[in-house]
Amino acid sequence: MKKISQLGLALFFATLSTVWIGCGDDMPDPSADNDQFDRSVMLEHWVDGFIIPGYKSYLEAIDSLDAKAKKFVADPDISRLNDLRNNFGFAYNAWQEVSMFEIGRAEELALRKHTNIYPTNREEILSNIISETYNLTLPSTFDQQGFPAIEFLIYAVSETDLLIVDLFNSNVAYKTYLTDLVTKIRILTGEVYTNWTTGYREMFIEDDGSSASSSVNRMVNDYLFYYERFLRSGKIGIPAGVFSGSPLTNNVEALYTFTPTLSKSLYLNSLSSFKNFFEGKSKYNGNGPSLSEYLSYIQTLTSGANISSAIEAAIDNAIEVSNGLDDDFYIQVEEDNSKMLATYDALQEVTVLMKTDMLSALNVSVDYVDADG
């Protein structure tokens, strides 16, 4: 066997090293050094285009609901009940636009759990009213408050509208409980809005790094968790029986509303709000930097797939499939659950793209347990 000279080995490894370094220089690296996307401008648009004006609008809707509730409680009649229901629907829809922003003070207060846990616990609500002893700050009472509990009181606490009015006229405890429910939402929402407008806005925007605790990374995780757990699963998957093996009609959101029913409108509002946030399309101050734009920027660094366009197409497809659902999801589940299951499948396509491709491209790690079930 011939021996390789030391000089030959040196030349071989030097050449190999040169080739390796050269190849490395040609490969785009979406690292923190190469990623020059201005996160702070995107954060500013998120806050000023969605979060603060969204909470302001929602708080105004809650104030209006509070005013109508007080009028109804002061002198219950059919006309005031209908006015209360109209404002209830308006406020419930306004909630869909901010529910995804469970960050900062909203997370500390568990705003979403105080506001929209369903199905509501009818038996415990009635027990609370009868005993007149309850503590709405306890986690055990999350399913006895918020919009679902208000809905039960003004739509289904008795068999007819006239009987509902009579019940409120004859029992002050019902008036007290309704007032307490609306007040609870108003106070918590006011705290969240005040926090954003008295210092947290600036703190949130300034934290524009790429660490796991940075504003972008936390918001992306909270945004995706909301989509998985509360939009995809809560509004569609759970009532359709995706996780239980059989439909759960009583788990439909806005179960008791009628003329109009709210389940579909709440769902479509939440889905369109989710889409608008991804694309940076604010109804308050126009278009701005977004996750979609950020992904397109990353694509220019990596010459990779157009993840942004794929996600937008998947969301648009989910909306198109959803438009074919009945206005009343209870009826849809009961009469043709296959359409609910098809809607879930369409929503799941978005989940896969966001949770794998988007998070990988943005170098964001999931900070929550899988939301399935």
Image (cartoon, rainbow, N blue to C red):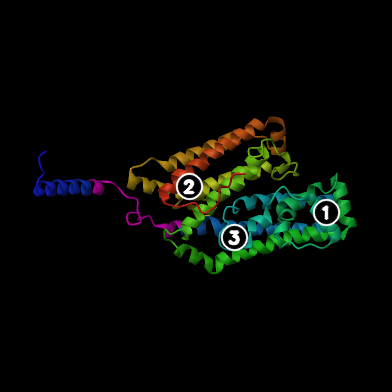
* Image-quadrant location for residue 272: top right
Q: Is residue 192 above or below residue 296?
A: below
* Image-quadrant location for residue 325: top right
Pointer 1 or 2: first along the chain:
1
Q: Which residue is mark 3?
A: 107
Q: Residue visible at 61% across and 48% down?
A: 230
User: Bounds of the magenta span?
Assistant: 23-42
Contact (Cβ within 8 Å) of mark 2 with mark 3: no
Residue most toward the bottom? 198
Residue type at tag 1: Leu
The span from disc 1 to disc 3 (Cα, nearest Å) is 29 Å
Q: Is residue 18 left or right of residue 189?
A: left
The span from disc 2 to disc 3 (Cα, nearest Å) is 24 Å
Can residue 283 be seen here? The reply is no
Q: Which residue is mark 2?
A: 279
Residue most toward the right? 170
The N terminus: image quadrant: top left
* Foreground tag (2 vs 3): 3
Contact (Cβ within 8 Å) of mark 1 with mark 2: no
The percent position of residue 84, horizontal first and vertical second, equals 76, 53
Residue type at tag 3: Glu
Contact (Cβ within 8 Å) of mark 1 with mark 3: no
Q: Residue visible at 42% across and 42% down?
A: 307
Q: Nearer the viewer, residue 197 or 9?
A: 9
Mark 3, Cα crowd under 10 Å, few <14 / some 14-19 / many 20+, is some
The percent position of residue 91, horizontal first and vertical second, equals 68, 53
Q: Is residue 45 above or below residue 257?
A: below
* Foreground tag (1 vs 2): 1
Q: Nearer the viewer, residue 203 or 87?
A: 203
Q: Is residue 100 left or right of residue 298?
A: right
Q: Which residue is mark 1?
A: 126
